[in-house]
Image (tube, rainbow, N blue to C red):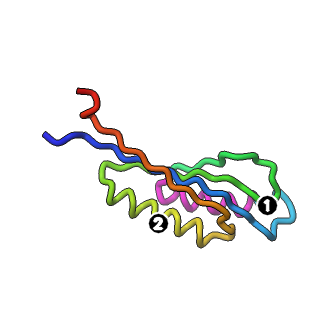
Amino acid sequence: MEDLRVHTCTLVADLHLRGAASLKDRRKELKSLVDRLRRDGYAVAQVGPADLLQRVFLAVSDVSGDVTHLDERMDAAERLLLESEFEVGRLERLERTWSDSSLR
């Protein structure tokens, strides 16, 4: 029997919205991006301060039993971030694999 493997990946993005004149402007663009990511099945959370006018920190996560599928999904999530209204200042990809063989 093959080992059970669970692969997780989280993108942590430092996003900038240069044209935001108010928190309302930033929230509108952020909501659009978050909704789009969630529609595609990603878990999304704002992880930094919520009161910065032109900056937001976002975590985007997914999980899969197939590492190739997970890589493809996270590549797609990266593209969504890069194609958004936000300028990506920093983007980190954190990956982890859990295996049931570690329980034996």
Name the residue at 59% across, 58% down. 35
Residue 91: mark in rendering: none
Number of labelled discs? 2
Main SS class of the magenta portion in the image: helix
Name the residue furthest top.
104
Residue highlighted by disc 1: 54
Residue 14 place in picture, x, y as percent: 67, 57
> Circle 2 sits in a helix, a strand or a loop, which is it?
helix
Q: Nearer the viewer, residue 19 or 35?
A: 19
Q: Please give left or right for residue 71 compared with residue 82 in the image.
A: left
Q: Please give left or right for residue 86 compared with residue 92 in the image.
A: right
Query: What is the three-letter code of the residue carrying label 1?
Result: Gln
Q: CA distance from mark 1 to mark 2?
A: 24 Å
Q: Is residue 40 magenta?
A: yes
Q: Is residue 36 magenta?
A: yes
Name the residue at 36% across, 44% down. 97
Residue 86 place in picture, x, y as percent: 68, 67
Residue 41 place in picture, x, y as percent: 47, 55
Q: Residues within 10 Å of mark 2 (few under 14, many from 20)?
A: some
Residue 46 place in picture, x, y as percent: 66, 48
Say whether disc 1 or disc 2 marks the residue closer to the N-terminus: 1
Residue highlighted by disc 2: 76
Q: Quadrant of the N terminus?
A: top left
Name the residue at 27% across, 27% down. 103
Q: Residues within 10 Å of mark 1 (few under 14, many from 20)?
A: some
Name the residue at 86% across, 65% down. 21
Name the residue furthest left.
1
Q: Which residues are magenta?
A: 27-42
Q: Choose top left, top right, bottom left or bottom right for residue 91.
A: bottom right
Query: What is the three-letter code of the residue carrying label 2?
Result: Ala
Q: Please give left or right for residue 29 compared with residue 22 in the image.
A: left
Q: Nearer the viewer, residue 69 or 89?
A: 89
